[in-house]
Amino acid sequence: MALNVGDTHEAVVVENVQRTHIVKYAGASGDFNPLHHDDVAANKMAGYPSVFAHGMLSMGLTGRMLTDWLGPDALKKFGVRFTKQVWPGDTLTSRGEVTAVANGEATIKVVTVNQNGESVVEGEAIAAV
Amino acid sequence: MAEGYEFPVDRTQVMLFARSLGDIRPEYSDPNDAATKAVGGIVVPPTFVQCSAHWQPDYPLDLTRPRKGAAPAHRGDGGGGGLGRGLHAEQHYEYHNPVHAGDTLTVTTHPGERWEKEGRRGGKLLFSESITEYRNQDGVLCVTARSIGVQTERAVDA
């Protein structure tokens, strides 16, 4: 698809994260770290107040914003840093912005924020255009 | 794990994974949809290769997996987060060729860099990287994944 510098796309990728969302991701991905599904273990193992979502759930949801925008076969690269944990009750919004287009590839700055505007995932994607 | 293991890409697994991300696009579940045919059959979400955990013999983050013998120890050398104070710091993918349902990927992982940093939220931070390559049944490199894990001295605040 045609992309130009400054093009943006934004989408709410999950509203009010439930433990069920997190458990569903655990089952699908195979990541059964108790930190993500067992409140008692999350507290006992590492002092967390509750379970929190897998970073890869946040990245996967962020990826959905990209594929909804660009299609399922456009990405060449996709990379993120996990900047904040995602807790039950959070609502996440993902945004992409084209920062460069050259040689048939668009560079897209990617960020996902929670309901307080704090970023939980920051990164970059390269897409074929 | 230099010799690698096989990860068969199953259509049901693709559907389940897409569903866990709230994604209902037909290219992830319906082989008869025109959109799916246009991409050469069922394709996978950008982070799908994480599902190889189900097939990784020494995958450490499934403590109740039935096994012969003792469960593997978590080595804390990248590969995402970890138990206790381990967290997933970064994840990067490079997509070389498409993955389709029905492919059998061979997965090989090797450790990358390790480094240390003084953090603001969790005390001293120990970073480690692992690089995983996914090749299909024709030996074609499809995806390269680079995962950076971090061990913190203290629990990171909410």
Image (cartoon, rainbow, N blue to C red):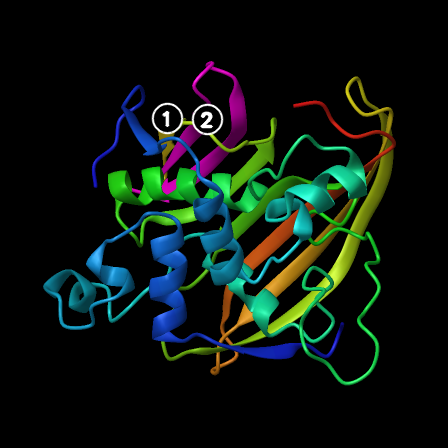
- Percent position of residue A54, x then y: 57, 44
| Res. B20 mark | none
Tell whether A113 sits left or right of A36: left
Q: CA distance from mark 1 to mark 2?
A: 5 Å
- Asked if the stretch drawn in magenta spans residue A119, the answer is yes
The residue range painted magenta reads A105-129
- Percent position of residue A107, x then y: 41, 32
| Res. A111 mark | 2
Tag 2: residue type?
Val
A112 lies above or below A79: above
Residue in the picture at 30% in, 29% down: A11
Query: Could you classify mark 2 by the number of other residues whose Cα lies within 10 Å: few (under 14), some (14-19), or many (20 or more)?
Result: many
A93 lies above or below B81: above
User: Viewer-proximal residue, B140 or A64?
Assistant: A64
Tell whether B15 sits left or right of A27: left
Quadrant of the rendered structure where residue B89 is? top right
Q: Quadrant of the C terminus of chain A?
A: top left
- Percent position of residue B37, x then y: 17, 69
- Percent position of residue B94, x then y: 51, 52
Tell whether A83 sits left or right of B124: left
Q: Do we see residue A91 in this rendering?
A: yes
Residue that mark 1 sits on: A95
